[in-house]
Amino acid sequence: MIAATLFDQPHMELLKRALSAYSLRHRVVADNLSNVGTPGYQAQAVDFETALANAAPPFRLRGTVTAPGHLPLGVAAEPSAARTQPVGEPFDNGVNDVNVDREMGELVKNDLAFRMATRLLSRRYQGLRIAITGRTQ
């Protein structure tokens, strides 16, 4: 029973998969920026949000219903299906379709999301470590 509640938590697996998707997005943005001067290069993007919205169980975040009058909560999430695709933005920098301003904005947004997921996962592991060792500080 304890192992099922402490170690078998789907949100921890979801955070791990989110970190993988954010890492993929970072690599794709870095590739786009490094190929800004490559003739004919087509900018790529990671479609993580669509995969997140179209996910099927068991990776669902669920709220806990603590009273009969509460509404059930649930948000689908399966970030492991993140994949790259062409940006499709009509932009021409004279060499290819890489928009440096857009890519830098994506890099900043992705960095913030990655840091948030890292902190959440770190705190979860810290909570488990404290529970196992029995120390509060």
Image (cartoon, rainbow, N blue to C red):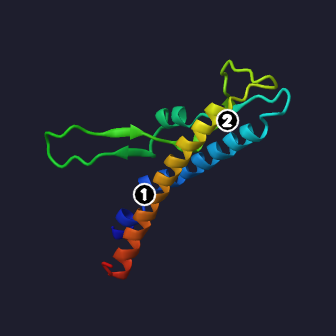
Picture residue at 45% right of the left edge, 46% below the top = 59
Mark 2 secondary-structure assignment: strand
Picture coordinates of residue 67, whole percent (x, y): 14, 46
- Residue 9 lies left or right of residue 22; in this view the side is left
Picture coordinates of residue 108, whole percent (x, y): 56, 43
Which of the two discs, 2 and 1, labels the residue nearer the N terminus? Answer: 2
Picture residue at 54% right of the left edge, 35% below the top = 51
Picture coordinates of residue 16, whole percent (x, y): 52, 55
Above-or-below relation of 68 to 118? above
- Residue 81 lies left or right of residue 93; in this view the side is left
Mark 2: few, some, or many residues within 10 Å (few <14, many ≥20)? Answer: some
Identify residue for label 2.
Answer: 84
- Residue 69 lies left or right of residue 45; in this view the side is left
Quarter of the figure that contains the N terminus: bottom left
Mark 1: few, some, or many residues within 10 Å (few <14, many ≥20)? Answer: some
The amino acid sitting under disc 1 is Leu
Q: Using the image as rendered, state which of residue 3 and residue 37 is in the foreground.
A: 37
Above-or-below relation of 70 to 127? above
Mark drawn on residue 28? none
In space, the residues marked 2 and 1 are separated at their CA atoms by 26 Å
Picture residue at 68% right of the left edge, 46% below the top = 27
Residue 18 in view, yes or no: no
Picture residue at 82% right of the left edge, 25% below the top = 95
Mark 1 secondary-structure assignment: helix
Mark drawn on residue 120? 1
